[in-house]
């Protein structure tokens, strides 16, 4: 089959030319083979004396010429030009038909139809319009033959040939157009395929590079990373995790998180923490576990796939960080804070005590100047103690160590204590300290009484510091449902409007220079603000220069279940 | 006869000041400087009328001494215990067991006035 196909096909760059030459080859080959068969049969009949040479000589010669012609046309078609071969073939065919019958039959008889064959073939083998050329040629030949036998040419037949030519022309043309369009579509399709293939190759390459880069990043970061699917099976872990946990990756990847939690190196407390995280699915953003001698900080984040317009949880990424050193430093820091707190306060307490003993004339009478001096020592020592307390509070808050401990207390107690602590200082400056408590405030509340007291002392202290004449007033009240408030108002200097946003900043006082005039680090209000925040409360300031300021603290109201509890305190 | 006050305090200066305050209102004062000495003293000898107990002391902590010795000793049932601490939280935690809690810094006058009120009138 392929040999036959190779025999018939002429490869050229023009696909139409190839198609036409192939069709011509098929036709020429068919004609050649049929003629060859006819030649063989008639030659055989002469040789075996079935027919006389005179009877069949014309057929034999015709067949032989056709065979030779076919071969020549085939060779021209194959090696030279399809058009010339086709023209020769069609002209040859037309003439064969013209002389294959008696002139009468050709001009207007049984052989007339034969002329239609080259006309139709022309539109296929040559350009479409060539069918008109061959219909004209046929018309001329018929007319000449008719004239030679003194007959009128068969005009309807000639017109018929033109109609056939028209139909062939139309069909060949539409066939060629359809083929052309198909070819263009094919070409475009090829183009698209090439483009797509290229894009796909590029994107695959990009993805490969990206994946490689991600892997490289994952491999080189110092934090341990492990990715879990929704069932807490580890699907990925990086080498940092391996060295951090000191476990081969095979014991981590493709294992369930529970296997890791059960590892004996994990402290029992940490195990409980991790199980709680698994079971309740509530993950604090970050927490610490003890792994052998190491302290690890774990941050877990759920991963969501939002590519398909829906937020589906597809797993969890957990990042392990070696927190051992930080934990040690933190422990040291808190020990340091505790020691400093104790060690600084004790000698100061002694200084204070001795100064008081002077003032109280324990060892004999003192003159006025000596008493005055003892008073100064006491005041300065108290200031120093206040500063130490503020600094320690600030340090604790920065370390996140300061926590709020709720217990029942009487709001009235706060006022009693503030008078106890501040009366002397207020009177010393020639001011008045007044207080009131709203009737609608419950008798008892839940709260951190020591810290509430601290807020109040700091606020009153602040007011006293910036007030030269008049009153400092403390009010406890109930602004709205589920809230209670503490308000400290004064008749002091007031705060300039532009400075109000900054008054709660650490280490800052209005004008910057005020620190020296009024003393202190400027930590008092900052501590108040931080304490109020820790209690989920809010603090607001209203102030007018030379008229005074009002500080209002609003806190969530929690009423204890048992309203009374006996307290022993000084 | 004056009542006995026992000061358990490791800081010598503070102990001195406390002693002066207590003597000032008529107490007879004894001082020990650590938890072990405090425990030894409490197990024998005369029963103090008042104990001024620092919570941060060497060997046996003030908290231990309070919970395991003082509050378990029948002889000390009537003794008034004042604990002293710099840690307000710790003070809070022992309000039930102590009669009074004083947060450091402790004022000489404050201690003198308080103990003066506690001492039975003659």
Image: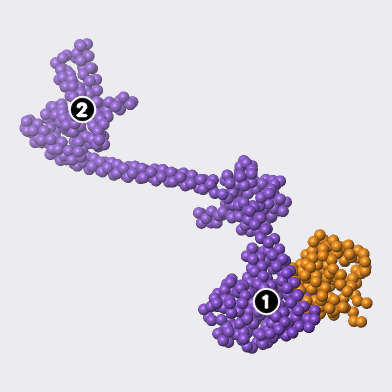
Chain colours: A purple, B orange
Q: Is residue A166 left or right of residue A272?
A: left
Height in image: A396 above or below A553?
Answer: above
Using the rendered image of the protein, determine whether residue A462 is visible from the camera's viewpoint: yes
Q: Along the line of sight, which residue is nearer the eye, A97 or A203?
A: A203
Q: Along the line of sight, which residue is nearer the eye, A348 or A225?
A: A348
Q: Along the line of sight, which residue is nearer the eye, B72 or A287?
A: B72
Chain ID at mark 1:
A
Instruction: Give the quadrant of residue A186.
Output: top left
Using the rendered image of the protein, determine whether residue B66 is visible from the camera's viewpoint: no
Q: Is residue A133 left or right of residue A448?
A: left
**Can you identify the residue that label 1 sits on?**
A380
For the residues tagged 1 and 2, is the chain the same?
A: yes
**Can you identify the residue that label 2 sits on?**
A79
Residue at image x 55%, y 56%?
A: A311
Q: Along the line of sight, which residue is nearer the eye, A435 or A53?
A: A435
Chain ID at mark 2:
A
> Is mark 1 in CB contact (under 8 Å) with mark 2?
no
Residue at image x 44%, y 46%?
A: A206
User: Count the marks: how many?
Assistant: 2
Q: Answer with mark 1 or mark 2, whichever residue precedes in sequence.
A: 2
Residue at image x 61%, y 82%?
A: A466
Crowding near the residue tagged with mark 1, few <14, some 14–19, many ≥20 C-alpha atoms within 10 Å: few
Judged from the image, the secondary structure of the residue bearing numbered disc 2 is helix
Judged from the image, the secondary structure of the residue bearing numbered disc 1 is helix
Crowding near the residue tagged with mark 2, few <14, some 14–19, many ≥20 C-alpha atoms within 10 Å: few
Q: Which mark is residue A311?
A: none
Quarter in which the C terminus of chain B is drawn: bottom right
Height in image: A20 above or below B100?
Answer: above
Percent coordinates x, y for residue A513 in the rendering: 55, 77
Percent coordinates x, y for residue A331 in the rendering: 68, 58
Give the distance between the C-alpha atoms of the residues marked 1 and 2, in whole angstroms.
121 Å
Percent coordinates x, y for residue A454 in the rendering: 69, 74
């Amino acid at each position: 089959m392929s040999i036959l196909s190779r025999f018939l096909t002429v490869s050229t760059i023009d696909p139409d030319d190839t198609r036409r030459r192939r069709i011509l080859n098929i036709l020429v080959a068919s004609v050649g083979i049929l003629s060859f068969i006819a030649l063989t049969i008639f030659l055989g009949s002469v040789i075996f004396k079935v027919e006389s040479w005179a009877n069949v000589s014309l057929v034999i010669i015709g067949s032989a010429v056709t065979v030779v012609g076919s071969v020549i046309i085939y060779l021209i078609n194959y090696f030279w030009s399809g058009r010339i071969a086709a023209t020769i073939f069609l002209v040859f065919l037309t003439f064969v038909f013209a002389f294959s019958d008696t002139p009468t039959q050709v001009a207007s008889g049984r052989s007339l139809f034969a002329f239609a064959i080259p006309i139709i073939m022309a539109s296929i083998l040559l350009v479409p319009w060539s069918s008109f050329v061959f219909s004209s040629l046929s018309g001329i030949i018929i007319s000449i033959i008719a004239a030679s036998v003194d007959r009128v040419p068969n005009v309807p037949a000639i017109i018929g040939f033109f109609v056939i030519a028209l139909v062939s022309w139309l069909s060949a043309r539409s066939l060629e157009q359809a083929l052309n369009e198909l070819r263009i579509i094919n070409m475009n399709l090829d183009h698209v395929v090439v483009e797509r293939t290229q894009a796909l190759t590029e994107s695959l390459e990009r993805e490969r590079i990206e994946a490689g880069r991600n892997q490289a990043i994952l491999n080189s970061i110092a934090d341990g990373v492990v990715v879990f699917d929704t069932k807490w099976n580890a699907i990925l872990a990086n080498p940092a995790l391996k060295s951090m946990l000191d476990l081969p990756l095979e014991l981590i990847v493709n294992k369930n998180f529970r296997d890791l939690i059960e590892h004996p190196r994990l402290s029992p407390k940490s195990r409980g923490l991790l199980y709680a995280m698994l079971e309740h699915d509530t993950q604090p953003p970050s927490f610490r576990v003890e792994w052998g001698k190491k302290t690890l900080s774990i941050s877990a984040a759920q991963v969501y796939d939002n590519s398909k317009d829906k937020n589906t949880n597809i797993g969890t990424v957990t990042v392990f960080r070696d927190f051992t050193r930080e934990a040690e430093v933190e422990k040291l820091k808190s020990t340091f804070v505790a020691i400093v707190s104790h060690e600084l306060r004790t000698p100061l307490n002694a200084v204070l005590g001795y100064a008081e003993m002077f003032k109280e004339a324990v060892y004999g009478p003192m003159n006025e100047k000596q008493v005055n001096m003892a008073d100064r020592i006491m005041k300065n020592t108290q200031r120093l103690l206040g500063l130490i307390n503020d600094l320690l509070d600030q340090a604790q808050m920065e370390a996140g160590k300061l926590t709020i401990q709720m217990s029942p207390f009487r709001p009235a107690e706060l006022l009693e204590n503030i008078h106890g602590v501040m009366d002397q200082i207020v009177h010393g400056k020639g001011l008045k300290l007044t207080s009131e408590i709203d009737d609608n405030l419950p008798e008892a509340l839940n709260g951190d009484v020591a810290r509430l007291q601290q807020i109040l002392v700091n606020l009153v202290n602040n007011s006293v510091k910036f007030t030269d004449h008049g009153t400092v007033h403390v009010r406890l009240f109930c602004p709205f449902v589920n809230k209670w408030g503490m308000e400290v108002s004064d008749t002091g200097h007031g705060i300039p409007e532009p400075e109000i946003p900054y008054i709660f900043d650490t280490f800052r006082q209005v004008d910057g220079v005020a620190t020296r005039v009024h003393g202190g680090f400027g930590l008092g209000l900052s501590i108040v603000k931080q304490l109020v925040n820790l209690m989920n409360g809010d603090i607001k300031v209203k102030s007018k220069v030379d008229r005074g300021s009002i500080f209002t603290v609003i806190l969530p109201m929690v009423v204890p279940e048992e309203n009374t509890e006996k307290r022993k305190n000084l | 006869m004056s009542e006995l006050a026992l000061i358990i305090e490791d800081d010598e200066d503070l102990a001195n000041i406390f002693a002066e305050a207590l003597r000032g209102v008529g107490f007879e004062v004894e001082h020990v400087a650590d938890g072990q000495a405090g425990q030894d003293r409490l197990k024998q000898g005369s029963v103090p009328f008042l104990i001024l107990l620092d919570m941060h002391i060497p060997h046996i902590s003030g908290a231990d001494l309070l919970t395991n010795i003082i509050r378990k000793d029948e002889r000390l049932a009537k003794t008034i215990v004042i604990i002293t601490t710099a840690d307000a939280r710790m003070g809070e935690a022992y309000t039930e067991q102590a009669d009074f809690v004083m947060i450091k810094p402790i004022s000489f006058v404050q201690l003198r006035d308080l103990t003066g009120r506690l001492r039975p009138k003659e």
